[in-house]
C-alpha cells in the first residue's frame, strides 16, 4: 500500500514533466540536435573516405606526421583547455585526431584526458559566468547576444547542460550562462560529466574512420 502511494506522486510528476517538455518543444529540439550529431558524424566519415579516394594517402600521412611532430603535447593540451574555457571555438575532433597520431597506442587515454580538460574548461566557463555578474554592462551584453541560450536554460534547466555536453551546442557558452543565472554548481558538475560520453562516442567513430591513415 505504501509503495503504491509513493509511486502515484512519482508517476504524476513524470507525466507533468512530459507534458511540459512536449508543450515547450524540448523533444523537437532534442530530435533536431540528435539529427545534427548524426549528420556531423556521417559527414566526418564521408569526408575521410573522399579524401582517401582523391588525395595521395602516403603524402597525407607524411603531412599529418609532420604536423604532429611540430606541436608539443603540453602546448596542445594547454591550448585545448583554454579554448574549452572560453567559447570552445575549435572542434575537439581536431585534437582527437592529433592525439591518435601522436599517441597511437594510448589514443583512448588521450581522449579521456581531452574529455577531462573539456570538463574542467566547462567549470572554468561556469566561474567566468559568476565573475561576469559583477560587471552589469558585460552581463547585459551577453544576455542580448545569447538571448536564445538564456531562454533554453530558463525553460529546461539542466537538460540544456546535458545537451550542450553531448550535442552540437556551445558547451563553454552554456556553462558561462549557467554561472550567470546561478545554476546550482553541484548539479552542474554532475550533468557536465556527460561530456565524457560525447568524447568517447566521437572517438569511436573518428578512429574507426581514420585507421587507414594512422
Image: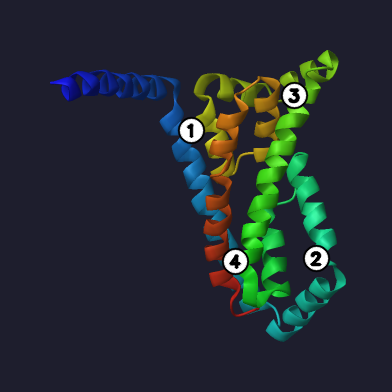
Label 3 with label 1: CB-CB less than 8 Å: no
Residue at the spot of label 1: 29
User: Residue 46 lies in what quarter of the image?
Assistant: bottom right
- Closer to the chain start, of discs 4 and 1, is 1
Q: Quick one: SS at disc 3?
A: helix
Q: CA distance from mark 4 to mark 2?
A: 15 Å
The residue located at (66%, 64%) in the rendering is: 110
* Label whose residue precedes the other's in the sequence (3 or 1): 1
Q: Earlier in the sequence, mark 4 or mark 2?
A: 2
Q: Is the residue under label 1 in contact with that under label 4 (CB below 8 Å)?
A: no
For marks 3 and 2, the one nearer the N-term is 2
- Using the rendered view, name the quadrant where residue 127 is placed: top right
Left or right relative to 101: residue 136? right
Q: How is the image coloured?
A: rainbow
Whole-percent x, y for residue 2 in the image: 17, 20
- Disc 3 crowd rating (10 Å Cα; few below 14, some 14-19, many 20+) is many
Q: Is residue 138 at all visible to an observer of this figure?
A: yes
* Residue annotated with mark 2: 73
Tell me the crowding category of disc 4: few under 14, some 14 to 19, or many 20 or more residues within 10 angstroms, Cα based.
Answer: some
Q: Secondary structure at mark 1?
A: helix
In this rendering, the answer to whether 145 lies above or below 67 is above
Quadrant of the rendering where the C terminus is positioned: bottom right
- Position above or below: 29 against 50: above
Frontmost of labels 1 and 2 is 2
User: Which numbered circle lies on residue 130?
Assistant: 3
Mark 4 vs mark 3, CA separation in Å: 33 Å
User: Pointer 4: what residue?
Assistant: 108
- Drawn side of residue 69 relative to residue 114, left or right: right
Q: Residue furthest bottom?
A: 58
> Seen from this angle, which residue lies furthest top?
136
Q: Earlier in the sequence, mark 1 or mark 2?
A: 1
Q: Does residue 138 appear to the left or right of 12 in the view shown?
A: right
Amino acid at each position: 500500500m505504501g509503495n503504491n502511494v509513493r509511486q502515484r506522486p512519482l508517476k504524476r510528476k513524470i507525466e507533468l514533466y512530459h507534458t511540459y517538455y512536449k508543450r515547450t518543444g524540448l523533444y523537437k529540439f532534442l530530435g533536431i540536435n540528435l539529427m545534427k550529431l548524426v549528420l556531423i558524424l556521417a559527414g566526418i566519415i564521408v569526408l575521410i573516405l573522399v579524401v582517401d579516394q582523391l588525395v595521395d594517402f602516403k603524402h597525407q600521412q607524411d603531412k599529418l606526421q609532420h604536423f604532429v611532430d611540430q606541436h608539443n603535447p603540453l602546448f596542445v593540451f594547454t591550448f585545448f583547455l583554454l579554448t574549452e574555457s572560453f567559447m570552445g571555438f575549435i572542434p575537439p575532433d581536431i585534437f582527437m585526431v592529433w592525439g591518435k597520431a601522436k599517441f597511437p597506442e594510448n589514443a583512448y587515454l588521450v581522449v579521456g584526458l581531452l574529455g577531462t580538460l573539456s570538463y574542467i574548461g566547462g567549470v572554468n566557463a561556469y566561474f567566468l559566468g559568476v565573475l561576469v555578474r559583477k560587471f552589469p554592462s558585460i552581463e547585459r551584453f551577453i544576455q542580448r547576444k545569447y538571448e536564445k541560450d538564456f531562454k533554453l536554460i530558463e525553460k529546461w534547466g539542466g537538460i540544456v547542460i546535458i545537451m550542450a555536453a553531448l550535442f552540437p551546442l556551445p558547451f563553454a557558452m552554456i556553462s558561462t550562462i549557467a554561472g550567470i543565472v546561478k545554476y546550482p554548481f553541484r548539479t552542474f558538475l554532475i550533468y557536465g560529466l556527460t561530456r565524457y560520453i560525447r568524447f568517447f562516442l566521437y572517438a569511436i567513430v573518428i578512429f574507426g574512420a581514420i585507421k587507414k591513415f594512422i
